[in-house]
Image: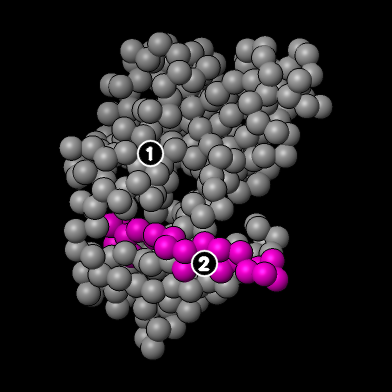
């Protein structure tokens, strides 16, 4: 099938929710491969990430958005703006809620902003494999009362439960029209952006609570060598000297391990050998650097 085939469907589904609701895991599962990084750390996703999934004659453009929360700093405001920007003009908005955690203060800013959205709104209760079933039903009733949702689905993005039904429903809800992307394209992210995200994911996985939230990865150089391999130079930005020591680890071992894991994953994703060079830079005011926002795909907000 190609984009010119008649009777095709194509539309945009905005995936929104609180931090750690499982949005990126859901998008990756629906696409069938990684397009967004994941970690147990809240607010892992910082920018709009677009995944492209196919279901029958339908192409689904899935916009994975940063978790919506009450912003306190410029970076926070930029992320929340990116989240609602990703929902703008979508054919439907899917609100992903952690079925185990339920409603809490994290959900308040989302519910307030969600009520008056003009787009069709669906509820996806995630992590049902580890949630208490009775609580799920109460949660569903409360959210439907508040938000007037069109559809409700119970899924586990981690195990795949309920995903075939959800994907089929998304496809059926899309408007008729030509596909927006080639059949083999799974994301709008450039290889350069993907490289920075994969390294940032390894930072989260290996440093856990030690890692300061205010950390960024900037791909300074991305080039192909004559032998077909790729050379990547990245700087990891931290706010303080003590944070640099954490990322480096004893004798630089932590940074070597981060680089090794990121290199292996990038080689697998890109299908070529990767030469990855990392260094850690202390930049106290990186959150006030317009250039960094541009590089990581966020709009500057005052």
Q: Which residue is mark 2?
A: 232
**Is 143 located above or below residue 274 in the figure?**
above
Residue 262 location (% of width, % of height)? 54, 66
Quick one: label 2 or label 1, which is nearer the N terminus? 1
What is the quadrant of residue 68 in the picture? top left
User: In this orientation, does residue 220 appear?
Assistant: yes
User: In this orientation, does residue 204 appear?
Assistant: no
The quadrant of the image that shows the N terminus is: top right
Q: Which residue is mark 1?
A: 67
Residue 164 location (% of width, % of height)? 70, 30
What is the quadrant of residue 101 in the picture? top left
Which span is picked out in magenta?
Answer: 211-233
Q: Is residue 162 left or right of residue 141?
A: right
What is the quadrant of residue 48 in the picture? top left
Crowdedness near tag 1: few (<14), some (14–19) or many (≥20) residues, C-alpha within 10 Å? many
Q: Which residue reaches farthest right?
A: 1
The residue tagged with tag 1: helix, strand or loop?
loop
Residue at 51% over, 32% down: 63
State yes or no: residue 26 in magenta: no
Q: Is residue 55 left or right of residue 152?
A: right
Residue 116 location (% of width, % of height)? 33, 12
Q: Is residue 143 left or right of residue 193?
A: left
């Amino acid at each position: 099938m190609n984009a010119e085939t008649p009777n095709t469907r194509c539309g945009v589904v905005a995936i929104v929710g609180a931090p750690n609701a499982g949005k990126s895991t859901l998008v990756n599962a629906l696409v069938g491969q990684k397009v967004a990084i994941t970690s147990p750390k809240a607010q892992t996703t910082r920018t709009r990430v677009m995944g492209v999934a196919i279901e029958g004659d339908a192409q689904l453009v899935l916009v994975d958005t940063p978790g919506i929360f009450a912003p306190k700093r410029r970076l926070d405001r930029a992320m929340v703006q990116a989240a609602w920007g990703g929902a703008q003009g979508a054919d439907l908005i899917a609100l992903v809620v952690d079925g185990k955690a339920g409603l809490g203060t994290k959900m308040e800013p989302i519910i307030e902003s969600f009520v008056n959205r003009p787009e069709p709104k669906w509820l996806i209760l995630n992590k049902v494999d580890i949630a208490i079933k009775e609580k799920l039903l109460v949660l569903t009733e409360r959210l439907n009362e508040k938000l007037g949702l069109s559809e409700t689905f119970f899924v586990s993005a981690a195990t795949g439960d309920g995903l075939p039904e959800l994907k089929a429903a998304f496809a059926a809800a899309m408007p008729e029209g030509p596909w927006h992307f080639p059949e083999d394209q799974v994301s709008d992210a450039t290889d350069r952006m993907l490289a920075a995200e994969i390294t940032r994911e390894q930072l989260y996985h290996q440093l856990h609570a030690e890692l300061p939230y205010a950390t960024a990865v900037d791909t300074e150089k991305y080039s192909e060598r004559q032998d077909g391999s790729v050379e990547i130079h990245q700087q990891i930005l931290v706010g303080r000297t003590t944070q640099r020591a954490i990322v480096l680890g004893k004798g630089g071992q932590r940074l070597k391990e981060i680089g090794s894991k990121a290199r292996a994953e990038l080689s697998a994703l890109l299908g070529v050998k990767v030469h990855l060079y990392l260094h850690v830079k202390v930049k106290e005011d990186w959150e006030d650097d317009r250039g960094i926002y541009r590089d990581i795909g966020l709009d500057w907000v005052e």
